[in-house]
Image (tube, grey):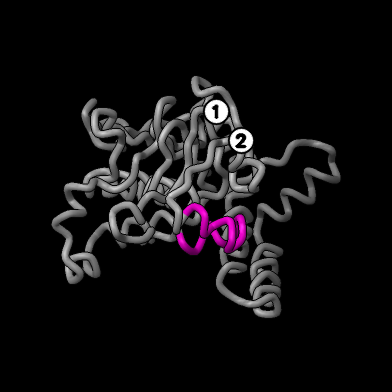
Amino acid sequence: MTAEEQQPDDAPVLVERHGHVLVATINRPQQRNALSSAVLAGIVAALDEAEGDGDVRAVVLTGGTKLFASGADVRELRSLTPAAYLRSPRQKAFARIAAFPKPLVAAVAGYVLGGGCEIAMSADIIVAADSAVLGQPEINLGILPGAGGTQRWSRVIGRFRAAELVLGATNVDAWTAKRMGMVSEVVPSEFVVVAGIRAAESLALFSPVAQRSAKASLRMSEEIGVSAGLDYEKAQLGVLLSTQDHFEGIDAFLEKRPAEFTGE
């Protein structure tokens, strides 16, 4: 039984299928989709389901058409000691999202703040509503972004622009984020989830095994130098050259027909 079949309407994360795409929706509108432990656990459960199901080729993570996530649940944060923080399931949840091996699209609207922004930056593609406001307000609470905000912003927009957001708690709108290279598409709010699904469906057309290897190579580029990255890339290509999807892709190209990839 899938999460979609058994989920109650008040579940912290709702799951539904659209063909080869799984859509996970954060569902705490009264709390502005604050990232409680239950929400993070729900996201992880959805990703676990998606990874274990060969029929799912891409995932959309969203909060709906009004807001994505306003950040951490401050009430939970207030009682978090240093020791509890180090062993917190929250850290494992953020790491799980960042390490998810299939294509991940974030479809964001309204508040995309704090941990919500860090989750969005863990995706491969961000589709934003024209209402989206992105930022890292943690400095207002006497802390710093602890789930990748100081690292990923710098890599996307550069250290000096990142300092404006992280040190100055400055927010940016969707159009500014697009100019910065963070957001790939800006759409009217009411269409953001549809646009996210559309983006995921376009990724789901390709070979699942090739997508995983390509994503792994892209992520590895953030961790190692160019020479080591090229070696990693070549190793991934070597594996793909022996797959059925590779042979199918070549045959489809030569026969001038759409490829039918199976992930094998």
Q: Residue at x 62, y 65 (%)?
A: 217
Q: Which residue ends up furthest to the front in the rendered image?
A: 168
Left or right of 128? Residue 29 is: left
Res. 150 visible in picture = yes
Q: Residue at x 72, y 49 (%)?
A: 248
Q: x%, y% of residue 112?
A: 43, 40
Q: Residue at x 68, y 77 (%)?
A: 231
Q: Which residue ends up furthest to the left in the rendered image?
A: 79
* Tag 1 residue: 130
**First along the sequence among labels 2 and 1:** 1
Q: Residue at x 50, y 23 (%)?
A: 189
Judging from the image, what secondary structure is the residue with disc 1 in? Answer: loop
Q: Quadrant of the N terminus?
A: top left
Q: Residues within 10 Å of mark 2 (few under 14, many from 20)?
A: many
Q: x%, y% of residue 87?
A: 22, 68
Q: Which residues are magenta?
A: 150-165
Mark sitting on residue 175: 2
Contact check, label 2 and label 1, Cβ < 8 Å: yes
Q: x%, y% of residue 2?
A: 31, 37
Res. 213 visible in picture = no
Residue 163 included in the magenta stretch of the image? yes
Gap in Å between the C-alphas at discs 2 and 1? Answer: 7 Å
Amino acid type at mark 1: Asp
Judging from the image, what secondary structure is the residue with disc 2 in? Answer: helix
Residue 135 vs residue 186, the one in the foreground? 135
Residue 173 vs residue 52, the one in the foreground? 173
Q: Is residue 156 above or below residue 69?
A: below
Residue 161 vs residue 226, the one in the foreground? 161
Left or right of 243? Residue 87 is: left
Q: Is residue 158 above or below residue 249?
A: below
Amino acid type at mark 2: Trp
Left or right of 120? Residue 48 is: left
